[in-house]
Image (tube, rainbow, N blue to C red):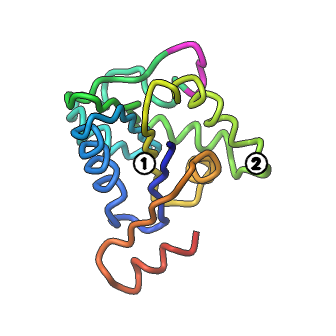
């Protein structure tokens, strides 16, 4: 199952939801992969520490160079991550807005190669409706939209 966690609002607990859900599923014996689709790389930082954003390979390389593996052990049994760093913003800019459903193949094709290895793939989306988020929403089987604290600005992020 591929699950995207997305909203346009920053600070709404997207990464917190992904990391904690991933850890909870792994504790229950599920094989979990977190894909850090955010160039801010907070899921990477949370699971791999500050050094995790300095050495690759990273998601942007995995998306461009189809023959490499960027999957890393998170330190939690059963929980792996494809880390990100600020260079992922270049991929987002190259993709531009997705115009057709087929454009999401830039993400779906690489994911197809690893889907059988995991029970759950959790996509930590950036706080924007850019090409990375659009692709994640297209390839996902389901979506969680956290709204953070119950306030008007948090609910405004639901407009995606």
Q: Residues within 10 Å of mark 2 (few under 14, many from 20)?
A: few
The image shows residue 108 at horizontal and vertical percentages of: 63, 36
Outermost residue toward the top? 67
Q: Residues within 10 Å of mark 1 (few under 14, many from 20)?
A: many
- Who's the residue at 62% across and 45% down the image? 139
Q: Is residue 79 left or right of residue 156?
A: left
Which residue was labeled with disc 2? 101
| Separation of marks 2 and 1 at Cα, in angstroms | 20 Å
| Magenta-colored span | 63-68
Element on which disc 2 rests: helix
Element on which disc 1 rests: strand
Residue 46 on the magenta segment: no
**The C terminus, quarter of image:** bottom right
Q: Earlier in the sequence, mark 2 or mark 1?
A: 2
The image shows residue 6 at horizontal and vertical percentages of: 47, 59
Q: Which mark is residue 8?
A: none
The image shows residue 90 at horizontal and vertical percentages of: 56, 38
Task: Name the residue nearer the viewer: 26 or 70.
Answer: 26
- Who's the residue at 20% across and 34% down the image? 49
In the image, is residue 24 above or below residue 48? below
Outermost residue toward the front? 28
Which residue was labeled with disc 1? 124
Task: Name the residue nearer the viewer: 25 or 108.
Answer: 25
Task: Name the residue nearer the viewer: 52 or 120.
Answer: 120
């Amino acid at each position: 199952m591929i699950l995207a966690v997305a909203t346009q609002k920053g600070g709404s607990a997207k990464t917190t939801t992904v990391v904690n859900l991933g850890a909870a599923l792994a504790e229950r014996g599920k094989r979990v992969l977190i894909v850090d689709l955010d160039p801010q790389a907070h899921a990477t930082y949370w699971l791999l520490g500050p050094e995790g954003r300095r050495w690759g390979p990273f998601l942007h390389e995995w998306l461009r160079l189809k023959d490499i593996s960027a999957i890393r052990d998170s330190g939690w049994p059963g929980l792996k991550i494809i880390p990100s760093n600020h260079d992922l913003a270049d991929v987002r800019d190259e993709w531009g807005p997705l115009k057709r459903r087929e454009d999401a193949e830039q993400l779906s094709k690489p994911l197809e190669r690893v889907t059988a290895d995991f029970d759950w793939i959790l996509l930590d989306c950036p706080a924007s409706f850019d090409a990375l988020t659009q692709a994640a929403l297209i390839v996902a089987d389901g979506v969680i939209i956290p709204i953070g604290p119950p306030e008007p600005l948090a609910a405004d992020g639901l407009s995606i």
